[in-house]
Amino acid sequence: MVNLIVIFMSIVFVNNFVLSQFLGICSFLGVSNKMSSAVGMGGAVVFVMVIAEAVTWPIQQVLNKFEMGYLQTVVFILVIAALVQFVEMFMKKYLPALQKALGIFLPLITTNCAILGATINAITFGYSFAESMIYSFGAGVGYMIAMILFAGVREEKLYNEEGVPTSFKGVPLILVSAAIMSLSFMGFAGMFQ
Amino acid sequence: MEKKNRLSILTNGIIKENPVFVLLIGTCPTLAVSTSLLNALGMGISATVVLICSNIAISMLRKVIPEKVRIPCYIVVIAGFVTVVQFILQAYAPDLNKALGVFIPLIVVNCIILGRAEAFANKNSILDSAMDGIGMGIGFTFALALMGTIRELLGTGGLLGHTLIPGFSIGFFNLPPGGFFVYGMLIAILMKVTKGKALKTKSFSCGVCPMYNSCNLAEANEEIAAEKAAMTQKGAQA
């Protein structure tokens, strides 16, 4: 139990997927311009990440049994792509409310490296099923936290770029702000091993 | 004429449409593996190999792949080449493979490769696609190497493991925040030098994303852009 808590806390704060492992940066920078999008995208990532982990972990055991571990990359990305399609169809039919909130973010998730990264990492670290579920849930939560915090910063502070040197307007300003936020997350380093 | 065109396709990826500094794609590997020059070069070359091979294969298959399932098809082709590269690295450069870690399999979802397949290889001839792959690959490797050089030099005071400036190191540049910072600074310098003309987009947006056509988020982003423009106008009037 303690082990699971340590895995969760460490992936949310110390090894935050976005701010210290650089996974999912594209969507982190692209979608964080509005709080509502950030929340939606974060929720969709948590949701898909947990389902993807639950599906890919048993598949890896089957692959290992037949000594085909090298097919990992090909199989995982295909499974994730199919899964995202399936989740989208399922939601449309049975959970229209959820579809409305998360639906538009789902196509983006297939090519989100955070999802594939989490599933591969859980296998590489040799986690048990329970541990990998907690790991991927934590990774999703960490992504969501980073996303929401950064969207807050961008909505409040970076909306109006008055007084910013011309060459720093737009992209460089966003990157430097992300650097400062990443720096603040470095404060968690060494808290959980 | 034909030859000149091919050459312009090649140089296009290196300078005019540099994937990292101009198109702002492939940011994950750029930030993550640029802690040292060696890692940056390893990542750049691996991605280039995959990019050239997948561009050629997808260009060959462009009349066979059905429009509706093209993205999964591209992903399978790319994943196949990534697995090959992974094997080669495991066999001949195990240390590099270990240093790059999860980012080697993650070449599969690298926006540059999927983006070029979608934007170029499925419309152009095999030779043109190969040229585009080489150009974009060199552009990506160059950007990574530049970031790697700066971060390794400032972070450890050396290059490729040799100490150049004894006793000098700013740990910040080796840490994750240093990646964001150096990337931001380089883009700011680029904007200064080209007077803001270099970047096609003023902010991170979805326009270059390979999933752009199947994604509704673009509309939401356009809304925000319009809102922002209205706000600045208001500010100017006041």
Image (tube, coloured by chain):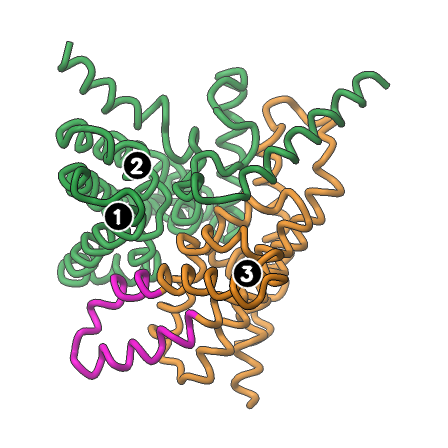
Q: Are marks 1 and 2 on the same chain?
A: yes
The CA distance from mark 3 to mark 2 is 26 Å
Q: Are marks 3 and 2 on the same chain?
A: no
Quadrant where the N terminus of chain B is found in the figure = top left
Contact (CB < 8 A) between labels 3 and 1? no
Q: Position of residue A15 (x, y in %)?
A: 52, 65
Q: Residue furthest top?
A: B1
Q: Which residues are magenta?
A: A52-79
Q: Residues within 10 Å of mark 2 (few under 14, many from 20)?
A: many
Circle on res. A44: 3
Q: Position of residue A93 (x, y in %)?
A: 52, 64
The residue that mark 1 highlights is: B74
Q: Is residue A153 above or below residue B188?
A: below
**How many marks overall?**
3
Chain letter corresponding to the colour green: B
Q: Position of residue A144 (x, y in %)?
A: 60, 60
Indicate the quadrant where residue B44 lies.
Answer: top left
- Write the residue at 46% across / 42% down: B154
| Amino acid type of the residue tagged 2 in the rendering | Arg
Circle on res. B116: 2
Q: Is residue A162 above or below residue B73?
A: above
- Chain A colour in the picture: orange
Indicate the quadrant where residue B89 lies.
Answer: bottom left
Q: Is residue A133 above or below residue B160?
A: below
